[in-house]
Amino acid sequence: MSDVTPGGGPPVHPPSPPPFRLYDTRSRDVREFQPVRPGQVSLYVCGMTVYDEIHVGHARAMMVFDTFVRYLRFRGWNVTFARNFTDVDDKIIERAAKRGEPAVELANRYIANFHRDTDSLGLIRPDLEPRVTETIAPIVAMIDELVAAGHAYPADGSVWYSVSSFPAYGALSNQSPDELRSADPEGGKREAADFALWKAAKPGEPAWESPWGPGRPGWHIECSAMVRHYLGTTIDIHGGGLDLVFPHHENEIAQSEAANHAPFAHCWMHNGLLTMSGGAKMSKSLGNVVNVEDILLEFPPEALRLYYLQCHYRSPLPWDPASALPEALGMLARLYEAVEVGSRMGGLGPAEAAAAELGPDALEVLQLGRSFQRHFLAALDEDFNTAKALGHAFELARAINRLSNHKRANARGGTVVAPALDALRLLGPALGLLAGTPATFAEEVKARRLPALGLTSEKVEAMLADRTGARMRKDWAEADRLRAELDGAGIVVMDRADGSDWRVRV
Ligand SMILES: [Zn+2]
């Protein structure tokens, strides 16, 4: 590309996004991100095997990478984001057989439900969502190459990857090949650690033609083939849950690097898992699954986003069904409250003079507001530390809410709070938080929390009207009783000069 513009003007360089650092599972350290191509990020994340609804454990990985992509774009990176669907697999085939329906129909239904839930969560759709059943030819081609190169061997209509043919096997998960054993139950393989690239068809199963007979891909090969087919031999970042490091990602490296003779991914980014109290995993068999669809009936999607992002993406995240989302909703409400009370502050004139006049709480808001962007971006640029970045936002919100308790601040604090309000506006484009207004948030909370409390807007309005009537008759006992009843039901009544308003307590 030429640096000289056709008109003979000064050289034009594309603006280069600022550097950031990221933990790489393979090298086990935080290092500066070096793109394969300047300004570009190719990101592949392992997606879902579609045979059930998504639960809040799955959604953590979706949310982490959604937010990471938003942040990279916000910083000026040109991101290509791919996430696959495993739409043919033992579990899908088993469940479809049990229900007496074709596997492809079951998979398609759960893909539709996945999109329903991730759209409701406010997740951006990846640029590419490849499916196994639509990527068979590139998969077969890659297996063929691995067989020709001596990294794989056919046996009884299946094809196995020979782990001992790839000396670097185990580097990602930090294990030596001798310790490794595969869970694949099929026979025909030469060594215990070998894994299936192609599975010979069993009667009644979905199958495709191949040089080794009819069958279907093993699980691991799809990601290697999809990455190469859609993004190229070497990508910038490969992502997924920590539970995929071994064997899945170890196998992806072995397949891709043996077939491509090139590094597979420059950086391996793994999110920590959701943990139930007592350390158990969220799983159907344990009966502790909380589906995204159900949680969104009771809580706004931003509360779920905040719940995930208040924890560093690599840390385990405890899930307490009773407190996780009520607490996150409360934290979100404090942020919106800061925007609301800050926006109401009036007054012109130089911020320094106003802050000096209003006292230490005002000086703090001014100072935190002005330094926020630097601290916020520094936290995110250092291994995408959303917990630390949000910590700065909560500190700022607390300071604004404290300042609003000063009567004079509401008339004089406008210029003091202005940098802080600008600062909080960064949360929308950077992290997908505070994307609404205090008013839309209040409506959203009403819409989701009232049914959860067994109430309707009409019922609350009717009780408020009764209370107004009691106040007009000067029946204070009845007015107080109604207020206490509303309070007990989770409704906060705010009496103003021009009447009463209400909100759901969070
Ligand atoms: Zn994968």
Image (cartoon, rainbow, N blue to C red):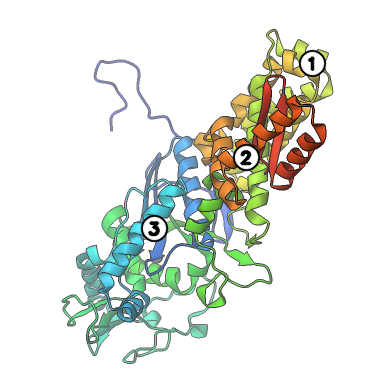
Q: What residue is shown at x 76% (from left), y 34% (from top)? A: 479
Q: Crowding at label 2, few (<14), some or many (≥20) Cα neighbours within 10 Å?
A: some
Of helix, strand and loop, which one carries label 3? helix
| Towards the viewer: 447 or 338 | 447
Q: Amino acid at mark 2?
A: Val
Task: Point out the quarter of the image occupied by ligand 1.
Answer: bottom left
Residue labelled with disc 2: 460
Q: Residue furthest front?
A: 473
State which tag comes first along the sequence, 3 or 1: 3
Residue at the image point whose x is 47% and y is 55% from the top:
62
**3 or 2: tag closer to the N-terminus:** 3
Residue 485 on image: x %, y %: 73, 44
- Label 3 belongs to which residue? 114
Q: Quadrant of the N terminus?
A: top left
Task: Please state which amino acid type lies under the numbered disc 3.
Answer: Phe
- Say which quarter of the image contains residue 382: top right
Q: Earlier in the sequence, mark 2 or mark 1?
A: 1
Relative to the observer, which residue lies in front, 108 or 279?
108
Answer whether residue 384 is visible to the viewer in this image.
no
- Picture layout, residue 159 above or below residue 132: below
Rendered image: mark on residue 408: 1
Give the residue type that dot 1 points to.
Arg
Instruction: Please identify, in this view, whether the residue under mark 2 or under mark 1 is nearer the observer.
Output: 2
Q: Residues within 10 Å of mark 3 (few under 14, many from 20)?
A: some
